[in-house]
């Protein structure tokens, strides 16, 4: 059975162009720096985000945690939003890998208050941990794109206090598409950035960590320590190159489909769509008024050839992606209506 998969944009499988590129990739041992395809990907990725160097890593979580591990000393404190992916969905890795503590701030839909960020930077005191890093996220995992003016203010504060800023840019190119800017216009407000090749861009594996050459040199050793020293990784990097060269420009199609999905969902009685957060390819909605069990809904949809996740913190999330067409969306809506009316 062919499934329509709305669980995430991580579910995208490689395009035929990616499969061809992977089959024909020139490879070598990347730990020895001998893989030409990985080298090409890293060079292209660094240029794309306006950084001196880049590093191919296995996943987004790996890239974020490697950034913390590289920027910080053990015992440092990291300032970030309490609803950020690093806090909520990376299984407590900062304490395990980097040995840092997180100083979480209440965000406004993913946006941090610059004044509060500055107020939480530690002074010099024998009793205090040292502030080692500020982390931002754009696009945010709640579906919103953070204004560049907010990033600029926080970056200026960080520079004033001689602190680095790391950007979790898992969906960086979605944010750029929404803002109608170049990715460099976002990443100029951070010292390092992680972005995913497998979220919406259809690459099967991998993310990129980018920053200064000195930072990436240190991160490369950290990657090896963390078990990310892959050997003939060019087969994976080949798909990543296709993702960055061919798939970025079409992300607006996913955004348009998400808006159609949001509009159609809002017409179903008992469903409240969070329109304020429909910036990219994610649609969040509350269906509690329908009194329908969301775990049962997952099974009902599955029986109809549709994969979804159950509610998290009372909200459902549908995510459009390359393999979800407008026709698929209307089938999903018709199926939803049929299930609720049964």
Image (cartoon, rainbow, N blue to C red):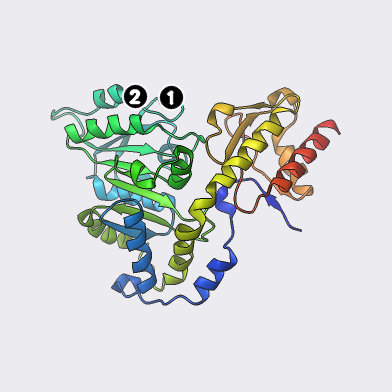
SS state under label 1? loop
| Number of marks in the rendered image | 2
Q: Residue placed at 30% from the left, 25% from the top?
A: 114
Cα separation between marks 2 and 1: 8 Å
Where residue 205 sits in the image (x, y, percent)? Answer: 49, 60
Residue under label 2: 113
Q: Nearer the viewer, residue 203 or 119?
A: 203
- Residue at 42% x, 59% y: name it: 58
Q: Residue furthest front?
A: 180
Residue 108 is labelled as 1
Residue 154 visible in the picture: yes
7 versus 34 height, above or below: above
Q: Quadrant of residue 308?
A: top right
Answer left or right for 319 relative to 144. Answer: right
Where's residue 237, x and y in %?
43, 66
Quadrant into which the N terminus falls: bottom right
Q: Would residue 243 appear left or right of 36 to someone viewing this image? A: right
Is residue 170 at least partly visible in the picture?
no
- At a point 24% along the width and 44% down the height, the residue shown is 72
Q: Quadrant of residue 169?
A: top left
Circle 2/circle 1 CB separation < 8 Å: yes
How many other residues sit within 10 Å of disc 1, few (<14), some (14-19) or many (≥20)?
Answer: few
Q: Residue at x 54, y 27 (%)?
A: 276
Q: Which mark is residue 58?
A: none
Image position, residue 313 (x, y; %): 57, 30
* Residue 242 point in image, percent of width and height: 48, 63
Answer with mark 2 or mark 1, whichever residue precedes in sequence.
1
Residue at the extreme right of the image, as rendered: 342
Secondary structure of residue under mark 2: loop
Q: Dividing the picture into quarters, in which one does residue 34 lie? A: bottom left
């Amino acid at each position: 059975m062919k499934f329509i998969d709305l669980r995430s944009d991580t579910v995208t499988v490689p395009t035929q162009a990616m499969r061809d590129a992977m089959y024909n990739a020139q490879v070598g041992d990347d730990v020895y720096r001998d893989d030409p395809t990985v080298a090409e990907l890293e060079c292209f990725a660094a240029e794309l985000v306006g950084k001196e160097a880049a590093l191919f890593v296995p996943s987004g979580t790996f890239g974020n945690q490697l950034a913390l591990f590289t920027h910080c000393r053990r015992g440092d404190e990291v300032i970030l939003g309490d609803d950020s992916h690093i806090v909520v969905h990376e299984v407590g890795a900062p304490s395990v890998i980097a040995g840092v503590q997180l100083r979480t701030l209440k965000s406004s839909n993913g946006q941090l208050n610059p004044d509060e960020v500055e107020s939480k930077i530690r002074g010099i005191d024998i009793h205090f941990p040292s502030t080692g890093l500020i982390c931002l996220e754009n696009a945010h995992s709640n579906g919103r794109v953070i204004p560049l003016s907010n990033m600029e203010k926080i970056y200026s504060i960080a520079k004033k206090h001689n602190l680095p800023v790391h950007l979790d840019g898992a969906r960086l190119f979605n944010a750029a598409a929404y803002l109608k800017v170049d990715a460099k216009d976002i990443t100029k407000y951070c010292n390092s950035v992680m972005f995913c090749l497998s979220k919406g861009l259809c690459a099967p594996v991998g993310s990129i960590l980018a920053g200064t050459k000195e930072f990436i040199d240190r991160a490369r050793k950290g990657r090896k320590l963390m078990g990310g020293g892959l050997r003939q990784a060019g087969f994976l990097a080949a798909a990543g190159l296709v993702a960055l060269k061919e798939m970025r420009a079409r992300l607006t199609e996913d955004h348009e489909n998400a808006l159609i999905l949001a509009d159609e969902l809002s017409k179903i009685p008992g469903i409240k769509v969070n329109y304020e957060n429909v910036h990219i390819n994610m649609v969040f909605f509350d269906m509690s008024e329908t009194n329908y069990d969301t775990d049962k809904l997952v099974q009902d949809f599955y029986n109809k050839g549709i994969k979804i996740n159950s509610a998290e913190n009372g909200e459902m999330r549908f995510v459009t992606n390359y393999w979800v067409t407008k026709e698929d969306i209307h089938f999903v809506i018709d199926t939803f209506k049929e299930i609720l009316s049964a």
